[in-house]
Structure formats: structure tokens, C-alpha cells
Amino acid sequence: MDTGELLRSITTLPIIAGGLAEEMLAGNFRSIFKGHGIEFDEARHYEAGDDIRSIDWNVSARFGTPYVKMYREERELTIMLLLDISPSMHRGGIARRGLSPYEQGLISSSLIAFSAEHTGQKVGAIFFDKDIEKIFKPRKGRRNIMALIMAALQYQQERTRGDKRGSNIASALLGAQKYLKKHSLVVLISDFYSAGWEQEMGSICRKHDVIALRINDPPDLPYPGLITLEDPETGIRIEAPAKQYSFQESWLQWHRERTIHWENQCRMNGASFLDLSTTADAAASLIKFFGSRNSAQHGYRERT
């Protein structure tokens, strides 16, 4: 999809975003993201019937009697979008049937941003590949969102940059954690072709609510024959015997193991997660994700 066509698609999203905003806030949003929209107010003595998960163990140990944390609702919510702009997001899969991962990621992040606008929330963004390329301070309003989108579209035009190989998710998560001073919703949008991000994911999940949105291409091989595969992150090329059953099984197994590892790390660290195919309807998938308490708490996979 060329940049003009992608922009025309994005300009229709504010209409769709209204439904997504209703699912995020009028539905189970606050219960899905426990602690979202509230901040610490005070500690008081534990009373019968209090949720034991609200016990403040530090204060309880200091005074020798149970105390629980009390919260009050915040007036505003900050949503920080972390968008992967690395080469693998732009190339797409071998059997290209839908959007590229970057196009699907940009549409998804735009939908979330427009939904936040409907409810008067602040939206910021961090664009990253092997480094953090650009940070947008969280602000309200359509002008801010369009500035984010136009900047992201420039990376769509510059997708052939050869000097920016690699994706460093850990750096993006660490940067977001340092930048965000208040409890926020962090939405990480990537194909997760990156290593060594697990520790930083756990760290940011302890302070913020996190959604890991993995954009995946169907792992189908294009035809049964000798094919050339190139890693867009490193530029390494190999010849692969796609006709051989053993290679096909190894290829699919590698993708299955990546998925299992990603899901397990999200669950372990307390991040909500959505596995979104490049061939899926992003709006329908996000509405289903936010509209289902079980899906957002434990993860959701949309592959069609």
C-alpha cells in the first residue's frame, strides 16, 4: 500500500474509533487494566472483607499490623504508543497477502489514538528501531494525533533505509519507563523480531499497564521450490529448500516457538497481549480484544 492510500485509510478511522472508545471505557476497561485510572491516596488499617491483594506489605511490616492501599480516580489517562519502525516491520512476509506489519501497526496505533481522543485522554509516542528515533510528548487533541501519524508515514516512505537495521525493544521499553512519571497505559506495537526484551518488559509492567500488540505475517511459504530468504534486520540471505517436508516443519515450528515464548513472557510479566495478523481487520480485532475481559487479561490471538 502506498503512502497516500494508507493515509486515506487512516483518515476514515476516527469514525470507527468511537466504537473502540466505548469498549475501552464503557466496557471492562478499568477492570481489565487493574489500577488503571487510579492513583495512590493513603493507607488505612485492614478491615474484614478487604481484598488481600490491596495490602501494603511495607507499611504493614513497619507498624506490625495489616494496612491496605487506598486509591482515588485520576482525571486523565496517558497512553504511550511504542511503534517499531525497523526493517522487518516494512518488508512483510514471504507470502504477502495483506498489509505489511508496519501498515497494520500504524493503523492499529491510529485507532487507539483516535479512541483516546474520543475520551479526552493524552496520547504520546515513541518510534524506535535499533535506537529510539523520535519521542512525542503526550498531548490531547486531533492536531497532536495527526502529527504522530504524519511522522509515522515518513518512516513508511523511508522504509528502505539501509543504515537502520535491527530492532531494540528493550531500549524502547527502558526509554518509556524513564520518560513516563505517572502511571500510564503503554502499548507496544512490534513484530517482536528482537531479543533480550524480557527483563525490561517485567520492569515496566510493575509501574504501568502494558499491552503487547504483536503484528505477525502468516508463515506460509510461497511455493514448493528453492527460495531465497533474507533477514531484513541483518541483511543475511540463505537458500532454502521450501519443497522439503523437513524444512517446512522446521519453519512452522520456529514460528510456533516464537509465539509461545512471546505469550509466556507477556503472561509472566503481567502484560495484556494481542496477536494480530496482517490479514486481519484491525478495528474488529481491537474492539473484540477490549470488549472481552478475559481476552485482555490473558491475551488474545487474531489470525484471520
Image (tube, rainbow, N blue to C red):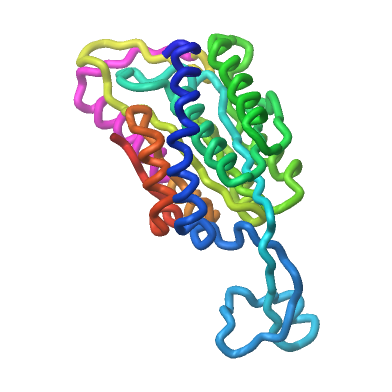
Evaluate whether residue 59 shows in this view.
Answer: yes
Location of residue 60 with respect to 155 vertically, above or below:
below
Q: From which residue to which does the magenta span run? A: 236-261
Q: Position of residue 73 (x, y in %)?
A: 66, 63
The answer to whether residue 144 is left or right of residue 3 is right
Quadrant the N terminus occupies? top left
Q: Position of residue 274 (x, y in %)?
A: 43, 43
Nearer the observer, 99 or 15: 15
Q: Is residue 242 magenta?
A: yes
Q: Position of residue 136 (x, y in %)?
A: 70, 31
Evaluate whether residue 192 shows in this view.
Answer: no
Location of residue 235 with respect to 21 vertically, above or below:
above
Could you tell me which residue is drawn at 49 percent across and 24 percent down?
A: 11
Could you tell me which residue is drawn at 38 percent across and 15 percent down?
A: 229
Quadrant the C terminus occupies? top left
Tell me which corner region of the image, top left, top right, bottom left or bottom right, holds residue 101: top left
Q: Position of residue 213 (x, y in %)?
A: 48, 39
Could you tell me which residue is drawn at 66 percent across and 42 percent down?
A: 122
Q: Is residue 61 magenta?
A: no
Q: Main secondary structure of the magenta part?
A: helix
Could you tell me which residue is drawn at 57 percent across and 23 percent down?
A: 85
Location of residue 286 with respect to 131 vertically, above or below:
below
Nearer the observer, 89 or 171: 89
Nearer the observer, 112 or 268: 112
